[in-house]
Image (spheres, rainbow, N blue to C red):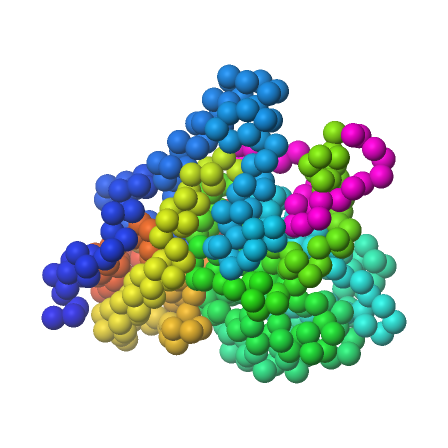
Amino acid sequence: MVFSLEYARKLDSQDSLASYREEFYLKEERIYLDGNSLGLLSKRAEKALLELLDSWKTYGIDGWTEGVHPWFYLAEKLGKELAPIVGAGQEEVIATGSTTANLHQLVATFYKPEGSKTKILADELNFPSDIYALQSQLRIKGLDPDEHLVRVASKDGHMLDEKDIIAAMTDEIALIVLPSVLYRSGQILDMKLLTEEAHKRGILIGFDLCHSIGSIPHRLSEWGIDFAFWCNYKHLNGGPGATGGLFVNRRHFGELPGLAGWFSSRKDKQFDMEHVLSAAEDAAAYQMGTPNIFSMAPLAGSLSMFTEIGMERIREKSLKLTGYMLSLIDKELEGRGFAVRNPRDENKRGGHIYLEHEEAARICKALKADGIIPDFRAPKGIRLAPVALYNTFEEVWKTVQILKSIMDEEKYKKFENKRGIVA
Ligand SMILES: *Cc1c(COP(=O)(O)O)cnc(C)c1O
């Protein structure tokens, strides 16, 4: 019986990644479904953080070159570990900055308005920080964002149609910045197709991988994508505010960083202290200042799990988890006012489920009261992310049962239908 608890347990017993759950700090009586917003702490990440703290204690300034993870090379070392996760060459990736800071860096580097080719193409469903960054980059260039930032419209308010994006790639577009996976609906955009079409028209294209990295495999180099950027605290479990990452296609190596600093230097030249920058010849050139060592430290542990397992296996389990959750939602929550807003197609579905409900804010509060951690997105979205490394099929089963009881027993009515300050 596919809708029974026994069946969920059977799926767990067949899960080849099940043992990784033991590696994380999970709480009894809590089902954590927010790993796409802030991933959980693993023992490996904790160990790496403590090792780096210890290198400060032990070596003082010599920690730059001594210890288990010499600080001077840590960004490059983590870049090499991130590379296979995004399908890139080792020199094409660097751990640095944050999503927003890296977007600024890459736009400052690759956006070169010329003649009538002056506009940036984005979409109307993107995360606000990305839009603010693009608007401010336009203002720096003396251009009016209302005119020069083109946002592709969504037909249904949840998904984007690649055909509409391609139709918007006019002669006036100089640069395109899009998400790989939409943060609400979880739709995966066809990055390969969009890159081919952009390049046919002489337009550079970059992607925000915040919601795809660590959740789905990528082939950034093979697809010819010009640049990408992301945070490492969602699916990659690097901790709150973890240092982010960026990718620059090797075809652009040598392009001077739009925002330079002494960490943009070639390592061997950096301490010559010259006033002429000898930029690194790879993605390392797009760093600026001294790396935030303790915000990178957890990654030195957590990435090893991704290296060990490989993205294909993570994706396989993730699809099983979300597919299973969808089938339970369809059966158990029918007629209770929920609408599934994520794509059902496996080629289009990212790592989380996105439901809408008029009472979403207080349904999320009721879920929390029952030990389930969802993610509320105003005004009426509920994101549920069963992640491959630490969630189980049994947790998915229980979540849907609890959602059903919250509706049938009207438990959500005990709460106010308003969002909290962080939601
Ligand atoms: C999480 C997220 C961000 C966050 O940016 P930070 O600079 O890390 O605060 C930006 N864009 C998208 C699409 C995100 O999902």
At a point 15% along the width and 60% down the height, the residue shown is 10
Vertical arrangement, residue 233 with respect to residue 132, above or below: above
Name of the residue lying farthest toward the right: 115
Instruction: Give coordinates of residue 115: x percent, y percent.
Output: 88, 71
Name of the residue lying farthest toward the front: 268
State which region is magenta.
272-295
At a point 42% along the width and 74% down the height, the residue shown is 347
Vertical arrangement, residue 403 with respect to residue 23, above or below: below
Residue 359 in the figure: left or right of residue 165: left
At a point 72% along the width and 71% down the height, the residue shown is 203
Residue 390 in the figure: left or right of residue 256: left
Instruction: Give coordinates of residue 120: x percent, y percent.
Output: 73, 67
Of residues 242 and 133, the one nearer the viewer is: 242
Residue 315 in the figure: left or right of residue 248: left
The answer to which quarter of the image holds residue 73 is top right
Judge whether residue 275 is colored magenta.
yes
Vertical arrangement, residue 29 with respect to residue 117, above or below: above
Residue 145 visible within the image: yes
Residue 126 in the figure: left or right of residue 422: right
